[in-house]
Amino acid sequence: TFPVLILCRNVNTQLMLYFHSFNLREFKFAQTLIFAIEEINNNTQLLPGVFLGYKIYDSCSSIALTILSGMALMNGYEETLRDTSCSRPPAVHAIVGESNSSPTIGLISHFATCACLSNRKRYPSFFRTIPSDYYQSKALVQLVKHFGWTWVGTVRSRSDYGNNGIAAFEEAAKQEGICIEYSEAIFKTDPQDQFLKTVEVIKKGTARVVLAFIALGDFVPLLKVISQHNITGIQWVGSESWITSRTLAETKEYSFLSGAVGFAIANAKLMGLREFLVNMHPDQEPNNEMLKEFWETTFQCSFSNSGSGGCTGSERLAELQNEYTDVSELRIANKVYTAVYVFRAHKITKEKKKNIMKLIKIKIMDLSSQVLEYIRGVQFTIKTGEEISFDASGDPVARYDLVNWQPVQDGSLQFKNVGFYDSSLPSEQHLQVNQEHVLWAEDSGQLPVSMCSESCPPGTRKAVQKGRPVCCYDCIPCGEGEISNVTDSSDCFPCDLEYWSNESKDRCVLKVIEFLSYTEIMGMVLCIFAFVGVLLTTIVSSLFYLHKETPIVRANNSELSFLLLFSLTLCFLCSLTFIGRPTEWSCMLRHTAFGITFVLCISCILGKTIVVLMAFKATLPGSNVMKWFGPLQQQLSVVSLTLIQMIICVLWLTISPPFPYMNLSYYRDKIILECNVGSALGFWAVLGYTGLLSILCFILAFLARKLPDNFNEAKFITFSMLIFCAVWFTFIPAYVSSPGKFTVAVEIFAILASSFGLLFCIFAPKCYIILLKPEKNTKKQMMMKSLHKTL
């Protein structure tokens, strides 16, 4: 016989003045331990030749008494709850218990969940069959995140259990963007003022979700104060310590806990346990004072009173429905059962049996690394189907049921499993919630909302309010060209260069591509003017052709006049190449066509101006200058001057031609599709050559304006070149300062204005004579006018 197991439990007896109530739950744990030991002893296949004994001490939830009980195990202190099969001084080889974390060191615990106990340097001999609060804290954070609660209050026990649990929760919550509005700590022995202060904090808080990471004994005094102040509308989230407490659920004054959710140890069924529990009777163990006290508490009687109110022994536990007899919730009791089974061996060889027998004889304070290694390597499946094993920290795999408190017809609350948490699954599958089965607090019946600030919709970003937690923020609209396409975005993101934000700032859309189109009003107006110019030029050409034998047409080289009209037609037409979507070919065509046609036009005018000057020189005695500048030379001069421009254009197109270009810098919200000139030198060479010929032509025409030419053509050329130069000189600043498609419009306007100026100034007077003054279109009239001018 080997006494190897002891339960340090908390039954809250009258051993200490401030503990005055009998704890049925803890007494049930003690009976479950005895049930498991007897089950092992009655099974000859588990530990053949080994008989387990036990001693049970009452710690009264006191650290001091727990230490005293531990010392008694080694020093022979014999005042125990029950002592069977032990005929010699205690020789305990393992301790199970107790329920609280702080008193639990060097034990195998069924209910001590503090993550601090996983520290192998401080507690090398500690093991537990219940998961560490490290996992529960992570699970609670995932639960809060799952329901969208970012603003919570916390209440904790002022103990290792509460302090370490909330610390782990806060650390994990911070990583998930969850904020803690307040964190209150209480203990059951605190004065009433402390509980009132905590209740006042909860009332004034704006968080609608409160996490109670608190021991059951600490929670009850707080609940009493809350019920007195009629605080409702709080969504409670509980730790495993109280979330499956039948006592709380059956107390109607605590109906405000309806809708509470929290993680509980997975439930189990222990066959035969209820029969074992209800068959307990003081007559079976007359010396068991704790059993008598349990009986008196349960049946509200006294063995010391033989009259009315005395215990007769005929009372039946099987007829009761209380926390002790209820076996529907064996979550923690199952962990007591499991802790006992850690020390049994199943299907072991004879060699292993010998090793185990040696290990069992070693006292707990002398546990060697071999013993610890044996316990750490335990891996088996108990009859409930649960697999038992320990990791390097002495912790089992974390598995929890997600429990929801739902009301029933009698006004009490029942526990409903609505999900689970399993740390052995992949991280994204740890938490599974059947949200449609969850019933929320009775005030709303809907999923509570607990946020410091309302969620920021797409198109805005969060700006943390100064001096407040990160969950308290203002929603700032995204700037132009920036978007946020998710709720509660912490920043706005700029769109790519070719995109712009839509009106709601939640999506990037392609920027409007702007260019001068044929379909828009301005483009159509310019096209109309261009075609009008072509039409007028054609009419003038036709008129000149019909009257080509008349003096006014033949005067001053009619070939140059027709060539000038042809070049003006090309000038009007080349303006059309500037309208429409720029392409590679249109960009090369528009600038070269403009340069060549205008040089051809100016060359013709220059030729006509030189003819006027040469004609005046030819009238002087002995002058034969006209034979050097006859029609053939005039045509060659036009071709030569135009050929120079063509060579410049060919070089420009060969070295660095114009190309379509999306200008993203001028406007932020749209793209200007324009033609990049490619080589700036080529572009300005074409313009410069055209400008040089224009200035030269203007100077010569100005010099010849008072010469006796036919119908004062030099004067008309001077006026036309004045208009031409004025238009193109004003074009430069207008071109540089005009935005987007207006740049192209300015260029087209300059082309049309200068072309119309040349057409009207040079050909309008002649058309006037041909159509309205035909009597002046005679050789006699021309000679008389020239003679009059000479005189």
Image: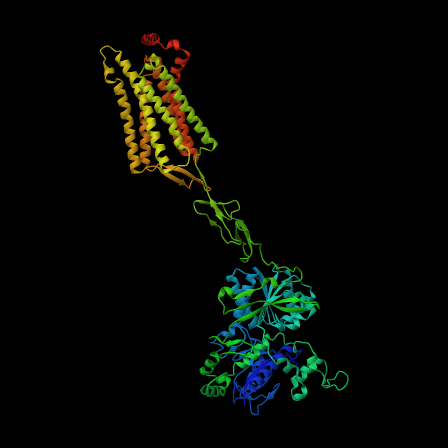
Residue 101 coordinates in the image, percent (x, y) = 56, 75
Residue 303 coordinates in the image, percent (x, y) = 72, 86
Residue 306 coordinates in the image, percent (x, y) = 75, 87
Quadrant of the rendered structure where residue 604 is? top left
In the displayed image of the protein, which residue is found farthest to the front? 546
In the image, 502 versus 545, the foreground residue is: 545
Q: How many marks?
A: 0
| Residue 12 visible in the snapshot | yes
Quadrant of the rendered structure where residue 516 is? top left
In the displayed image of the protein, which residue is found farthest to the right? 308
Quadrant of the rendered structure where residue 331 is? bottom right
Q: Give above or below for 130 relative to 76.
A: above
In the image, 780 versus 74, the foreground residue is: 780
**Which quarter of the image is occupied by the C terminus?**
top left
Residue 176 coordinates in the image, percent (x, y) = 51, 61
Q: Give above or below for 277 relative to 202.
A: below
**Which quarter of the image is occupied by the N terminus?**
bottom right
Q: Give above or below for 337 relative to 225.
A: below
| Residue 191 visible in the snapshot | no
Task: Tell whether 772 sits left or right of 484.
Answer: left
In the image, 399 versus 106, the foreground residue is: 399
Residue at 60 percent across and 88 percent down: it is: 83
